[in-house]
Amino acid sequence: MTSHGPFTGKGPEPQLIYRAEGYRDTGNLRETVWVCPHEHRTVEGALNCGQEWIGTQTESLTESA
């Protein structure tokens, strides 16, 4: 998930922040079962965070940054 971070006054728009989210593989509603509790400044950082979390899970989940 991508959203705007807090306005820092260093430019016309706030910096983008990223969070990893985990979803169940089944069903069409894509119910979120997990969202990382912290902000990432890069897509790669959010992706790595999500991949680490998925590695600890025993059920079938997918992750997107």
Image (cartoon, grey):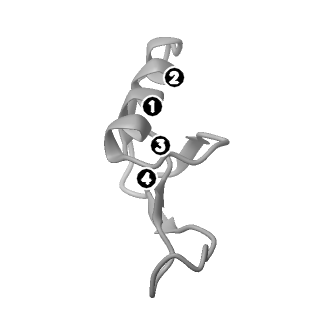
Q: Please provide percent x and percent y for residue 45.
A: 41, 36
Image quarter of the N terminus? bottom left
Distance between the alpha carbons at the discs numbered 2 and 3:
9 Å
Q: Please provide percent x and percent y for residue 43.
A: 34, 46
Residue denoted by label 4: 30
Under mark 4, the amino acid is Arg
Q: Secondary structure at mark 3?
A: loop
Under mark 1, the amino acid is Gly
Residue denoted by label 3: 20
Q: Secondary structure at mark 4?
A: loop
Determine contact: label 1, label 3, CB under 8 Å: yes
Residue denoted by label 1: 50
Distance between the alpha carbons at the discs numbered 2 and 4:
17 Å
Task: Check disc 2: other Cα within 10 Å, few if <14, some if 14-19, many if 20+.
Answer: some
Residue denoted by label 2: 53
Q: Between disc 4 and disc 3, whose residue precedes?
A: 3
Determine contact: label 1, label 2, CB under 8 Å: yes
